[in-house]
Image: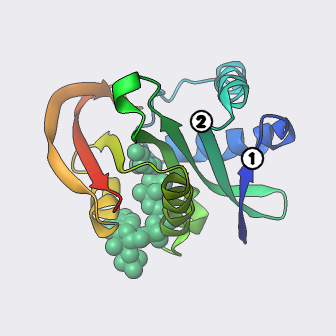
């Protein structure tokens, strides 16, 4: 397994990323989609991501052969007063590959890149009371609070989201 950053021209990774995302949604992961998402919507989502890739939107994968076992994105704020901060988006690890430290390695690569771009604040939101909360806390993120009824789970229930931040010294 190794970690690589993808560029806008690396679209041949789209099917593997789609397969990973379907697995995470099947497992109940709340990442912006419902469980009825189809292949066309999945392709459209990844096309949109690859269209944005560049210095202000970055994407890493954990790959094993031609499989993507995990991924994460960094989206840098474009507002003049927010150029020091970025949002962590769509961190996910395939159910077959969890608790092997992949998410921690993806976040380490993201943080190194963020520091390299002189960013000093990371923010994110994630489903409240999910395993992801424990994960982010283990990586030094601070919990600010939660917003109830924020997002529909893949199974159609309204769930709270928890807001997190981490200062990069
Ligand atoms: C959250 C997620 C990314 C963690 O990925 P992972 O590769 O299994 O995480 P790691 O192996 O790097 O875990 C590092 C530490 O985080 C904590 N952790 C991770 N998963 C956990 C779980 N299910 N329960 C409790 N703690 C957990 C542990 O402290 C773990 O260290 P340990 O294994 O030595 O105890 C993965 O479970 C996932 O993809 N979930 C669904 C998608 C999702 O919710 N993404 C976040 C959206 S913002």
**Whether residue 62 is situated above or below residue 128 in the rendered picture:** below
Q: Quadrant of the N terminus?
A: bottom right
The secondary element bearing badge 1 is classed as strand
Residue 49 screen position, x and y as percent: 65, 29
Q: Residue at x 48, y 59 (%)?
A: 111
CA–CA distance in space, label 1 to label 2 = 11 Å
- Image position of 163 (left or right of 168): left
Task: Examine the image and state in which quarter residue 83 appears.
Answer: top left
CB at disc 1 and ligand 1 closer than 8 Å: no
Q: Which residue is mark 2?
A: 57
Residue 97 screen position, x and y as percent: 59, 67
Task: Examine the image and state in which quarter residue 144 appears.
Answer: top left
Residue 76 screen position, x and y as percent: 49, 36
Residue in the foreground of this view, choosing between 13 and 5: 5
**Whether residue 66 is situated above or below residue 157 in the rendered picture:** below
Q: Which residue is mark 1?
A: 6
Q: Residue at x 77, y 41 (%)?
A: 7
Q: Residue furthest bottom?
A: 100
**Whether residue 42 is situated above or below residue 141 in the rendered picture:** above
The secondary element bearing badge 2 is classed as strand
Q: Residue at x 16, y 31 (%)?
A: 147
Which disc is residue 29 wearing? Answer: none
Q: Quadrant of ligand 1?
A: bottom left
């Amino acid at each position: 397994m190794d970690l690589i950053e993808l560029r806008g021209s690396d679209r041949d990774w789209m099917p593997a990323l789609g397969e990973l995302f379907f697995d995470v949604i099947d497992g109940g992961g709340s990442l912006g989609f419902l469980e009825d998402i189809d292949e066309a919507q999945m392709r459209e989502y990844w096309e949109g991501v690859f269209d944005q890739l560049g210095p202000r939107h970055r994407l890493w994968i954990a790959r094993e052969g031609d499989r993507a076992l995990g991924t994460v994105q960094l989206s840098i704020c474009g507002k003049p007063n927010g150029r020091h901060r970025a949002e962590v988006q769509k961190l996910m690890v395939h159910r077959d590959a969890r608790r092997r430290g992949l998410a921690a390695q993806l976040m380490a690569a993201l943080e190194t890149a963020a520091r390299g771009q002189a960013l000093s604040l990371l923010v994110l939101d994630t489903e409240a009371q999910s395993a992801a909360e424990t994960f982010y806390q283990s990586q030094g993120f601070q919990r600010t609070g939660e917003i109830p009824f924020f997002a529909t789970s893949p199974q159609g229930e309204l769930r709270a989201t928890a807001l997190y931040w981490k200062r990069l010294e």
